[in-house]
Image (spheres, rainbow, N blue to C red):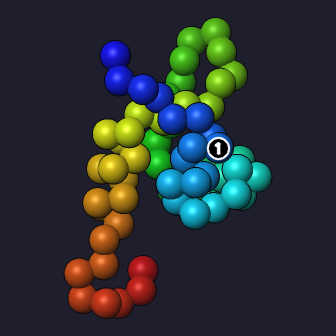
Amino acid sequence: MKKLLCIEELARLLGRSPETIRKDLKRNPAGVPPRLCIPGSRLLRWRVADVEAWLAAHIQQDGSQS
């Protein structure tokens, strides 16, 4: 099994604070990569492949802002 990212690791990767990511999970779910829902746990975890795919989907090709 590949390593899962915790919120602190995701925050470092995205250049954001863990608190901002927690807030975005509630107020702007599209603003963070899709997370894993581990049954019976409240742990926040992300697969590296999901984060990379999410980032790739948000690349601006023409320099315009979304």
Query: Where residue 53 appears, x then y in whole percent?
Result: 30, 50
Q: Is residue 40 above or below residue 12?
A: above
- The quarter of the picture where the N terminus appears is top left
Question: Which residue sits at x=54%, y=17%?
Answer: 38
Q: Residue furthest bottom?
A: 63
The amino acid type found where label 1 is placed reads: Glu
Q: Residue furthest left?
A: 61
Q: Is residue 14 above or below residue 64?
A: above
Q: Is residue 21 above or below residue 36?
A: below
Question: Which residue sits at x=40%, y=47%?
Answer: 51
Q: Is residue 37 left or right of residue 21?
A: left
Q: Is residue 49 left or right of residue 32?
A: left
Badge 1 is on which residue? Answer: 8
Along the viewing direction, whichever of 50 and 8 lies nearer the viewer: 8
Query: Where residue 49 appears, x then y in whole percent?
Result: 32, 39
**Res. 45 in view:** yes
Sort mark 1 into few (<14), some (14-19) or many (20+) by Cα contacts within 10 Å.
Answer: some
**Res. 26 in view:** no
Q: Is residue 26 above or below residue 36?
A: below
- The quarter of the picture where the C terminus appears is bottom left
Q: Is residue 61 left or right of residue 24?
A: left
All told, the count of numbered labels is 1
Question: Which residue sits at x=33%, y=50%?
Answer: 52
Along the viewing direction, whichever of 17 and 53 lies nearer the viewer: 17
Q: Residue furthest top?
A: 40
Query: Where residue 13 appears, x then y in whole percent?
Result: 50, 54
Question: Which residue sits at x=46%, y=42%?
Answer: 34
Considering the numbered disc 1 on the image, is that residue within a helix, a strand or a loop? helix
Query: Where residue 61 appears, x then y in whole percent?
Result: 23, 81
